[in-house]
Amino acid sequence: AMAKNAQALVSANKLDGVVTVLQQKMEDVEIEGKVDIIISEWMGYFLLYESMLETVLHARDKWLKPGGLMLPDKAILYLGAIEDEDYKHEKIDFWDSVYGFDMSCIKEIAYTEPLVDVVDGKSVMSSCVPIFNIDLLTCTKDDVKFTSPFTLAASRNDYCHALVAYFECAFTQLHKPLAFTTSPFAKYTHWKQTVFYLKKAITVCQGEEIKGRITCAPNAKNPRDLDVRIEVDFEGACMQYSAAQDYRLR
């Protein structure tokens, strides 16, 4: 119904001869000629959730003029480590005993589902590093599948209960480039942050490094979902930890 509302606004402002509203899937649109600019809010949780990027790339390849603008045109996904004992206890450990019933089997399922929520910047206890970046002018739909190594340097002595992901988007083709971030250190956005809980807390000393690798790809049965695998290797003064966990954003 948003198209009907948009058309009503066009008519109310006497712009019927200027603005044309099309209520169609992008893949079904047919227009004459090419376009100068494509504007799209395709970003999902963890940047890539819901796989809307493929539709934007379809529009780019079919309709954008050479030298045309994509807004936004660049995005970067970041990963960091957080201390989150209280919230983990509330959301994950809760299943150990639910009003006296053992529901720990559900706890295993809870670990596989990343939590989309607001992370306090004070909870971040490591460096945050880029794990994925994309240029909408040149990328392909296969680029949403990625594997990236990461090294997170601890900024203080603390426990690492989870890894947190957030993204930045940039409009670099404008005469005055601008960008926004969904970082825990920035103002709230509806994308919030994406939290991947580890099954075991890591005891980390300042300066030690949490190393690992993250792999992401659309789910084979439902491409709007994302399968994420995180491998972590840590060797510190207090403990050693090596594990791989599979998650699904749905």
Image (spheres, grey):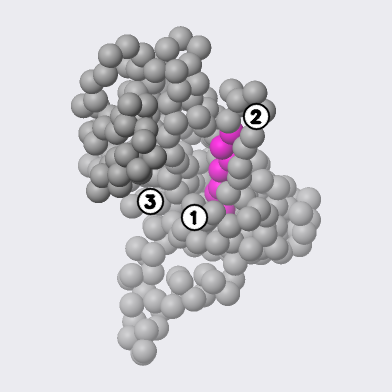
On the picture, is 226 further left or further right than 173? left
Q: Secondary structure at mark 1?
A: loop
Q: Nearer the viewer, mark 2 or mark 1?
A: 2
Q: On the image, numbered disc 2 is attached to which residue?
A: 177
First in residue order: circle 2 vs circle 1: 2
User: What type is the residue that disc 2 sits on?
Assistant: Pro
User: What type is the residue that disc 1 sits on?
Assistant: His
Q: Is residue 204 magenta?
A: no
Q: Secondary structure at mark 3?
A: strand
Q: On the image, numbered disc 1 is attached to which residue?
A: 190
On the picture, is 180 further left or further right than 141? right
Q: On the image, numbered disc 3 is attached to which residue?
A: 249
Kindly indicate the quadrant of the structure image that contains residue 86: bottom right
Magenta residue span: 163-170
Q: Nearer the viewer, mark 3 or mark 2?
A: 2
Q: Can residue 129 be seen here?
A: yes
User: What type is the residue that disc 3 sits on?
Assistant: Leu
Q: For the residue carrying disc 2, how many other residues have a C-alpha within 10 Å: few (<14), some (14-19), or many (20+)?
A: few
Q: Is residue 168 magenta?
A: yes
Distance from label 1 to label 3 (Cα)?
A: 16 Å
Q: Residue 69 location, x and y as percent?
A: 50, 21
